[in-house]
Image (spheres, rainbow, N blue to C red):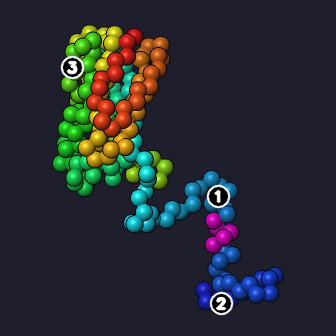
Amino acid sequence: MPSGRLVRFALPFAVIPARVPRLLAAASAMLLLGAAPPRLAPRPDVAPHNLHVAQARMMLEGTLVMARVRLFRDDLSKALKRPLADDAASKAVIAEYVVTHMTLRADGVTMKGEVLDSGGDMDGDQPVWFVLVQWKAAKPVKALGVSVNLLYEAFNDQQNIVQLAKQPGDERRGLYFQAGDRSEQVVKF
C-alpha cells in the first residue's frame, strides 16, 4: 500500500493515513511482549529532573568499606564545570571530586578513598554517573564516621542519601545529608 493512501474507517469523518493502523498494531504488540515504548528526546528548554539527589549504597565488612555512588550526570557536569565523557580525563576528575567530597573515618581515623571504577549509566530515563569507591581500615570498624558533601557547591537544595549495610548480619542504617550540612554522622556497630 502506498504510504500516501487514505483509508476511511467506521467514523464518517475519520480519514487517516493507511500506515497508522500498522504502526498502532506494532506498538500494541511491543507492549504486550513487555518491550518499552520508544522514548522521545527531552526538550532542551525543560529541566530533565527537579530533584538534586545523590545516592550511595555502602557496604561495610570487617576492615573494608565499598560504596556505589550515583549522581545525575547533568548535575555532576554542572558542579565540575565541564562536560562529562567516558574517558580517562573525565574519570580522573570525577574520582578526585568524589573522594574529596566523601569523607569516611573508621573509629576516628580518616580513611583514604580509592575509586575502582566509574562510568555513565541510566536510571530509568535519566542519565547518571556511577562511581565505585573503596576505603580500607587498619582493623575491623566498630564506629564509622561519614560525611557526604557532594554537589553542595552547585545546588542549594542538594540532598545526599547513604544506605549503609554492615556484614555479616546485614545491619542497615540510612544517613541523610542536605546542602550546607557538612557535619559527620557516626554509626556504631
Q: Residues within 10 Å of mark 2 (few under 14, many from 20)?
A: few
Q: Left or right? Give the position of 39 relative to 17.
A: left
Q: Left or right? Give the position of 185 relative to 24.
A: left
Nearest the viewer among 95 and 176 is 176
- The kind of residue tagged 2 is Arg
Mark carried by residue 31 = 1
Classify mark 3: helix, strand or loop.
Answer: strand
How far separated are the C-alphas under marks 1 and 2? 27 Å
Classify mark 2: helix, strand or loop.
Answer: loop
Rendered residue at 36%/35% (across/down): 178
Residue 125 against residue 46 in the figure, above or below: above
How far separated are the C-alphas under marks 2 and 3? 72 Å
Find the magenta span and give its range.
Answer: 23-27
How far separated are the C-alphas under marks 3 and 1? 51 Å
Residue located beneath label 3 in the image: 110
Nearest the viewer among 101 and 115 is 101
Q: Which quadrant is the C terminus positioned in? A: top left
- The kind of residue tagged 1 is Leu
Residue located beneath label 2 in the image: 5
Residue 61 locus on image (x, y percent): 37, 16
Identify the main secondary structure in magenta. helix
Is residue 24 shown in magenta? Answer: yes
Q: Residues within 10 Å of mark 1 (few under 14, many from 20)?
A: few
Mark with earlier residue (3, 1)? 1
